[in-house]
Amino acid sequence: MIVIDSNIIFSCLLKNNKFFNFIIDSEEELIIPKFAIIEIFKYKEKIAKFSKLKEDEILEVFYKILKKIDVYDENLISSHSYKKAYEIVKDIDEKDIVFIALCLEFNAKLLTGDKKLKDGLKKKGYGYILKN
């Protein structure tokens, strides 16, 4: 199982790039928290402005992505996973807690384009991050 960070989906919507192909072609189970959908919706105007795609194309790409990714209700993540995730990311970036908690909950890998998060996790010895 692989947890997909919101920034990967942003990247797909902006450039329709290698991450899009990875998601579409993946045989792995892919998952995002519901929170990621809210994040994407929050930045929809920026995505439309900077995308090289027309609005209909953006929606088509987003639909294809969502067909391949399970959306998980983060309220179902255990408090144990949240507490451990907080301890891991509190000095990196607390906004990423839900993604790390989801990784811990399912013993999943994380696909992220967030260099600060990747570097911080690697320094702490967390090796479940996919290279991109």
Image (cartoon, rainbow, N blue to C red):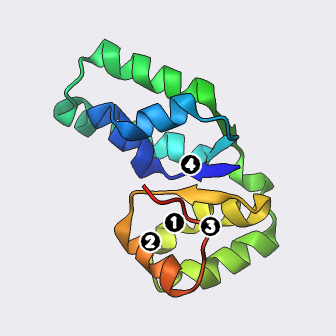
**Is label 1 or label 3 in front?**
3
- Distance from Cα at disc 2 to Cα at disc 4: 18 Å
Q: Position of residue 6 (x, y in %)?
A: 46, 49
- Inter-mark Cα distance, 1 to 4: 11 Å
**Residue in the picture at 77% in, 58% down:** 106
Please name the amino acid that badge 2 sits on. Answer: Leu
User: Residue drawn 70% across and 58% down?
Assistant: 108
- Indicate which disc residue 35 carries: 4
Q: Are marks 2 and 1 in contact (CB under 8 Å)?
A: yes
Work out whether mark 1 precedes mark 4 in sequence or the reverse, and give the earlier one: 4
Say which mark, if any, is on residue 96: 1
Which residue is at the front of the view, 101 or 17?
A: 17
Q: Which residue bears the numbered disc 3?
A: 128
> Residue 96: percent from the left, percent from the top?
51, 66
Q: Residues within 10 Å of mark 4 (few under 14, many from 20)?
A: some
Q: Amino acid at mark 1?
A: Asp
